[in-house]
Image (cartoon, rainbow, N blue to C red):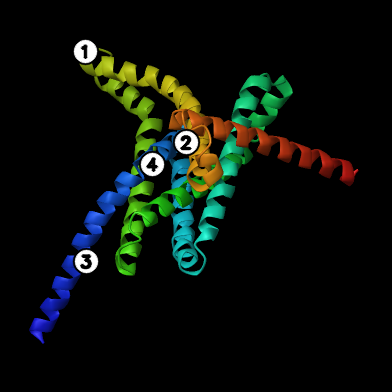
């Protein structure tokens, strides 16, 4: 009886060792997408009132966990029933990311100036704007989460089902907690800075660090907006490059990152044109 119990413990310990090793490999495989995930979500989680930053971030993080709870069983089921479906889902997700990235660029280049009435209306509808931004962040997270789960799953396909499930689950949890933990630190930089300034009575090293943190936050937020947009296009271009053989073989002499960025831009322009045309047709028919 006792020997049987200890045998089970040995099996569990061996399984955990295998999962630890597999998780390390899978995390390395997803490191690139996690970096892009961080940049995109940090940009999505900024731009709110200071008092709303943490509550908004918690809502996005909750949505991220729900995303992964949906994606994990579906990914394993599709991998078992019809593996090509995963590739199709990735490509559709890539189109969405490309659309969002190019839309941001178009918005920045051609729609930066807003009428005063529009600005006032936005301020009066901060709650609605917050909900829209949270929804957008969770939707983008869904696409990036699919990419993370698929890459992690692909790194352990030669393992047993138990190791696959545990490894991909571990990577999903690490991705969510790690990414949003770092995002939380970024968006609260100014509060920490103000506390250091106050505690040091505006003197000495702590005051200098506090002033640096306060002044650095707006710069970091602007940088994240740019990096997040580039990340969207790189992730989308990477999806097309890795999952569409014809595209993968195209422009072999061009550096991979530059090639993927171009793919993201092209896909985004096509997506924006299709969506804009669809909206115009819908409005015309509606009239």
- Crowdedness near tag 2: few (<14), some (14–19) or many (≥20) residues, C-alpha within 10 Å: many
The quadrant in which the N terminus is found is bottom left
Using the image, tell me which numbered label, if any, was put on residue 34.
4
Label 1 SS: helix
Q: Report the residue at 53% width, 59% height from top.
A: 84
Mark 2 vs mark 3, foreground winner is 3
Q: Earlier in the sequence, mark 2 or mark 1?
A: 2
The quadrant in which the C terminus is found is top right
Q: Earlier in the sequence, mark 4 or mark 3?
A: 3
Distance (Cα) linking label 1 and label 4: 37 Å
Distance (Cα) linking label 2 and label 4: 10 Å
Mark 2 vs mark 4, foreground winner is 4
Q: Report the residue at 68% width, 23% height from top.
A: 111
- Image height of 113 relative to 58, above or below: above
Judging by the rendered image, the residue that carries numbered circle 3 is 15
- Image height of 15 relative to 174, above or below: below
Which quarter of the figure has residue 18?
bottom left
Asked if residue 126 can be seen in this view, the reply is: no
x and y percentages locating residue 93 in the rendered image: 56, 47
Q: Are marks 4 and 3 in contact (CB under 8 Å)?
A: no
Distance (Cα) linking label 4 and label 3: 26 Å
x and y percentages locating residue 239 in the rendered image: 50, 43
Judging by the rendered image, the residue that carries numbered circle 2 is 40
Distance (Cα) linking label 2 and label 1: 35 Å
Q: Is residue 180 left or right of residue 267?
A: left
Outermost residue, right side: 287
Q: Earlier in the sequence, mark 2 or mark 4?
A: 4
């Amino acid at each position: 009886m006792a020997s049987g119990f200890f045998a089970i413990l040995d099996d569990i310990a061996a399984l955990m060792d295998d999962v630890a090793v597999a998780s390390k490999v899978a995390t390395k495989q997803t490191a690139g997408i996690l970096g892009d995930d961080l940049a995109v979500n940090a940009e999505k989680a900024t731009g709110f009132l200071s008092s709303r930053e943490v509550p908004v971030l918690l809502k996005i993080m909750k949505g991220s966990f729900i995303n992964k709870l949906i994606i994990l069983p579906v990914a394993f089921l599709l991998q078992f029933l019809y593996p090509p479906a995963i590739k199709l889902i990735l490509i559709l997700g890539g189109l969405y990311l490309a659309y969002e990235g190019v839309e941001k660029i178009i918005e920045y280049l051609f729609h930066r100036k807003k009428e005063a009435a529009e600005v006032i209306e936005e301020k009066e509808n901060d709650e609605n704007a917050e909900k829209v931004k949270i929804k957008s962040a969770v939707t983008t997270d869904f696409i990036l989460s699919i990419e993370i789960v698929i890459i992690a799953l692909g790194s352990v396909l030669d393992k047993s089902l138990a190791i696959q499930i545990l490894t991909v689950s571990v990577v999903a949890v690490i991705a969510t907690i790690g990414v949003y933990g770092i995002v939380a630190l970024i968006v609260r930089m100014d509060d920490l800075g103000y506390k250091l300034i106050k505690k040091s009575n505006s003197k000495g090293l702590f005051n200098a660090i506090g002033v640096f943190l306060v002044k650095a936050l707006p710069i970091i937020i602007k940088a994240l907006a740019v990096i997040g947009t580039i990340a969207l296009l790189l992730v989308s271009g990477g999806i097309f490059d890795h999952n569409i053989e014809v595209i993968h073989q195209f422009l072999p002499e061009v550096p991979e990152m530059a090639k993927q960025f171009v793919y993201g831009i092209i896909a985004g322009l096509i997506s924006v044109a299709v969506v804009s045309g669809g909206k115009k047709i819908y409005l015309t028919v509606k009239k």
